[in-house]
Amino acid sequence: MMITLNRRHALGLMGAATGSLILPGYLRAQGTRPSVTIAVQKITNNNTLDIWNEQSNVGERVFFPNLWEGLILRNWMGDQGPQPGLATEWTRIDDKTIELKLREGVRFHNGDEMTAEDVAFSFSPERVFGETQPAGGKTIFAENFKPETAKDLPANIPGIGRRLWPALAGVEVVDKYTVRFHNATPDVTLEGRLYAFGSQIANRRAWDEAETYAEWANKPVTTGPYMVEEYRPDVSLTLVAFDDYWGGHPPLERITFVEVPEVSSRINGLLSGEYDFACDLPPDQIGTVMDTDGFEVQSSTIWNHRISVFNTQNEILADPLVRRAMTHAIDRDAIVQALWGGMTKIPAGLQFESFRSSDMFIDNWTVPEFNPDLARDLLKQANYKGDAIPFRLLNNYYINQVPNGQIMVEMWQQVGLNVEIEMKENWSQIHDPSGIKGVRDWSASNNINDPITPMVVQYGPNGEVQQKKDWTNAEFNDLSIVMETSTDHGKRKKAIARMLEIVEREDPAYQVLHQNAVFTGMRSELNWKAAPAFAMDFRASNWPSNS
């Protein structure tokens, strides 16, 4: 859903903001390509540029489609479906096997031609899977892997690999430009997995030549239209044009992402000419940008839902009645109106409209109703005595995260729940196993037009929720295997319907709040268009030729 903004709507959110004409800081030099500077809330969460390690919304923004590319590309500016990429065509051999023909003449940033050997390496035990086996259903914990040298994979990556490719047995090199992906089990989503976040191709030689994993992960050699020039963790990331790109010369000379945590600083820098784009604007600040001549806000709802996650190791939250009470105590409509000005919507649980294209959308399903009386009754049944439940909260990693958290705490209080906010500085502190966990924020994305993402990928046996020991459910895990291995459409649809009942009603792992939306302030003269995603597309197809 694209959001149409006009000045009246913006000022209605913001109130009359005093605007003035700002001289453009973005100058088009004759005969040279322009460069842009983008102010973001965060560049990466773990200070690497590895698509397997940095599985995040902020990572999507800096990785795609400018740096990392897969065999199949995601149609970022359209329906988010598959497009030919580093592979020109693909064919199903059987339920377990897919063959792909590679695009010839593709160059990596170090000048090497991409071949089947690079593809096989990109999905190898050395690069991703470690000693894990191609079988779903068993949770892989990071503590099971202890890197022994600086070149070994970080402990979390094998589990992430099996989260995204639970049954990949290996990649066969048929010839220089042909590969076959062999799965240990049937999988109707193999094509989708190939364009999901994580399945992008890296250069084998660059990996071999790097002395440490950290050295490689700070400057990975890929095939994208831009390559890493300089990465300063927590400060900036500069990408520079790669003129041997298979898709033609990139339109920009440089793209610099600058980490600017505070919203006001991002907006002030945009309006003063220091930045050309300011990302992650909250709705109530849209008017500030749109009421200034020469600036606009690009925006849309995206395939990502904001959620809250429950930790069932907490003695109070171990009782599903308490978690159910929490889900019924939240007035989602009030949050959408108060914090978003009605500019997003409440989805049908953890579902996306794109699931309809594969007839996997469960109709007549909704988020838990706002019912304070039911919440109070559930707490009474649980014999809840008012003990404190911690809520580990980040400072607006998500748009409006802090005010959203404060509103929810007030709503929970109104039904008798004692939830206490604990402010944290980063995700490591959010997931820290020491101390008492309770509630945390998160989001869930759809990557491949099938409910296996996010349901199984994020909540199944190797989803982060179970790998972090927040929640688990035996029946849910059995159904995850059905989703991963069955080729029977009816059986898979029945499984996802039952999974929704378990995870959103009977034994809540999370509560869905609303669909996410992105608001990006920019100079109007750039004529750039935002994708319905966190990703920012700076390829030639999305940059006006007169720039």
Image (spheres, grey):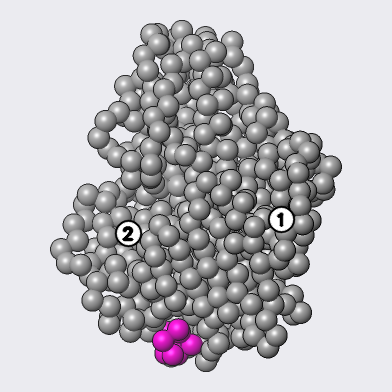
Give the left or right position of residue 64, taking residue 541 as reference.
Answer: left
Quick check: marks 2 and 1 in contact, CB under 8 Å? Answer: no
Q: Is residue 416 left or right of residue 130?
A: right
Q: Is residue 489 visible?
A: no
- Amino acid type at circle 1 is Gln
Indicate whether 223 appears above or below 41. below
Extreme residue toward the left, this view = 148
In the picture, residue 515 is in which quadrant? top right
Q: Is residue 387 magenta?
A: no
Q: How many marks?
A: 2
Q: Please report the residue visible at 21 percent of the width from the left and 52 percent of the height from the top.
A: 144
- Give the camera-side residue of 252 and 533: 252
> Which residue is rendered at x = 49% and y = 44% of the image?
397
Q: Position of residue 299 (x, y in %)?
A: 70, 52
Quarter where residue 181 is shown: bottom left
Q: Which residue is mark 1?
A: 298
Q: Residue at x 27, y 37 (%)?
A: 433
Q: Which residues are magenta?
A: 107-116
| In this view, 64 is above or below 358 | below
Q: Secondary structure at mark 1?
A: strand
Q: Which residue matches tag 2? A: 157
Q: How many C-alpha atoms fall within 10 Å of the one at disc 1: few (<14), some, or many (≥20)?
A: many
Q: Is residue 412 visible?
A: yes
Q: Say which amino acid is labelled 2.
A: Ile
Depth check: give the residue in front, 21 or 463.
21
> From the viewer's perspective, is residue 336 above or below residue 321?
below
Question: x, y (%) of residue 418?
Answer: 43, 16
Q: Disc number at residue 214?
A: none
- Residue 510 percent location from the top left of the image: 48, 34
Of the residues under marks 2 and 1, which one precedes in the sequence? 2
Label 2 Cα neighbours within 10 Å, binned few <14 / some 14-19 / many ≥20: many
Which dot, 2 or 1, sits closer to the camera?
Answer: 1
